[in-house]
Amino acid sequence: MDYRIVSADEAAALIHDGDVVAFSGFTAAGCPKEVPSAIARRAEMLHGRGEPFKISVISGASSGDAMDGALARADAVSLRLPYQNVKDMRAAINDGRVGYFDLHLSEVAQQMRYGFLPRPRVAVVEASQVTGRGEIVPTYGVGVLPTICCLAEQIIVELNVAVPQALRGLHDICEPADPPRRRELPVYAPGDRVGADCVRIDPKKIACVVVSDRPTEVAAFSETDAVTAQIAQNVARFLEGEMHAGRIPAEFLPVQSGVGNVANAILKDLGNSPVVPPFEMYTEVIQDSVIDLIKWGRIRLASGSSLTCSPAKIEEILASLDFFRPRLVLRPTEYSNSPEIIRRLGVISINTALEADLSGAVNSSHVLGRRMMNGIGGSCDFTRNAYLSLFTTPSTAKGGLVSCIVPQVAHQDHSEHSVKVLATEYGVADLRGLSPRKRAEAVIEHCAHPDYRPLLRRYVERCPEGHTPFDPAHCFAFHQAFAECGDMRQAEV
């Protein structure tokens, strides 16, 4: 079948005010770029004529500036889910201009199929190849691609000719059956492949194809600073100790790691460890450090939903595709983030907290409890089901004016029942098997910044009775102090 080749602006004309539009990708990897930017231009044109134009946007996770940034700046979004990390979209959400709710990324596809979320009328998907038989080969991210292609009435394919067709074979595309017919998801090792190398749909659903040559929008990571390096070292030494104690098998376990500089630094430290053997990853995002460790033989294989790598690292992968193809697997989020598979494989999860409290509960989404940062993402998919769950955070932020260890988190994403270990640059608090008061002691002693330890101890001393140290009159004193004078060290506890 021959598809209609059109410009991005012609494709955008297929999208109307009030439409639900789903986009491919997971992070900026695999996200379309030309068509979302054209939709933003269409919104600006219609707004200039006094006509309404806003759409609901669903994606696998976050995206890039060409999607979320352009659409937010054009005031083209009424609803956004399930995750975002672009500053203009974040500002629109926190200003109330865009409705937003985040949810566990493993549930997005199934909630669309169940009818819990709005069904997309149009899917806009980036592909490295599209065949006349209706085969769509993704680029660097998968996310909810199979589901949105299945559910959408129309599909706009953004064919990225900057991505070689030889990328085919990196993907493992599958979709579980819905209850009551769902069976086990048959991934028994990180490298198991259980699906196809492409999405297969009725070719008649493909409304048009837009040709693009845009590179990935994933930014290069900044250099590791002293605090990040110390956190990474603390986590690596802790996991080495778990191996020596026999609580982690000698062959080690698959690792999941969140996005960012701390995650990259931790993986490098694990890769350089003389104690940790070569290991595998079962994760959401595959970052630059993973590619280096695969080249060095320290990571045997990495399974995820996206290659969230810098442009330079993508070029390295493309230059050695025959080497990387058997060592990388890109899956839909329903598989990469599956609680069933995570628990079966015994994944060690390492994620980042905005703040943690004395019970070990973690806030990973809201600044001061009110302003959305990015969302919960897939962190809970892994944390709740991991063999061992760790959260990392610097002890302070904003030059010491904010303590990332507080009496009680202002917004709770992960309860103390899920978080096993906290790590900052000052040390590691192993919270397993501890009562609430012992947990508080461990967090203060091993994770809090010295400037804040007296305040935190004073808070615990104010709560002499009861199973859990909790004072409703002062549990948010740190946050209140920052709101009033911009310095949590002035908290009255």
Image (cartoon, rainbow, N blue to C red):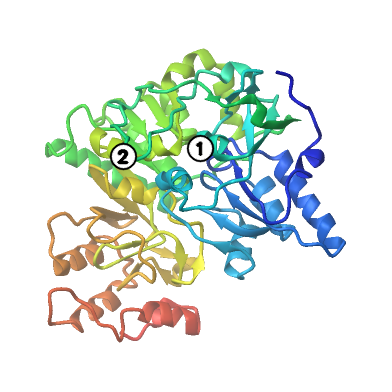
Locate residue 13, reporting x and y percent: 79, 44
Task: Please indicate whether residue 121 sits to the left or right of residue 195 in the image.
Answer: right
- Judged from the image, the secondary structure of the residue bearing numbered disc 1 is helix
User: Which residue carries the number 2 mark?
Assistant: 180
- Judged from the image, the secondary structure of the residue bearing numbered disc 2 is loop
Foreground pick, 360 / 42: 42
Task: Please indicate whether residue 125 sits to the left or right of residue 424 in the image.
Answer: right
Foreground disc of the pair 2, 1: 2
At label 2, the amino acid type is Pro
Locate residue 231, reporting x and y percent: 35, 50
Q: In this view, does 4 lie above or below 26?
A: above
Tell me the crowding category of disc 1: few under 14, some 14 to 19, or many 20 or more residues within 10 angstroms, Cα based: many
Q: Residue 147 got which mark?
A: 1
Q: Quadrant of residue 434?
A: bottom left
Q: In this view, does 94 lie above or below 316?
A: below
Tell me the crowding category of disc 2: few under 14, some 14 to 19, or many 20 or more residues within 10 angstroms, Cα based: few
Is residue 230 visible to the viewer in this orientation of the structure?
no
Write the residue at 66% across / 52% down: 19
Q: Quadrant of residue 55?
A: bottom right
Locate residue 168, reporting x and y percent: 55, 19
Real-space Cα separation, disc 2 to disc 1, in angstroms = 18 Å
Q: In which quarter of the image is residue 281?
A: top left
Foreground pick, 276 / 437: 437
Q: Residue furthest right?
A: 49
Which of the image's four quarters has the N terminus? top right
Which of the image's four quarters has the C terminus? bottom left
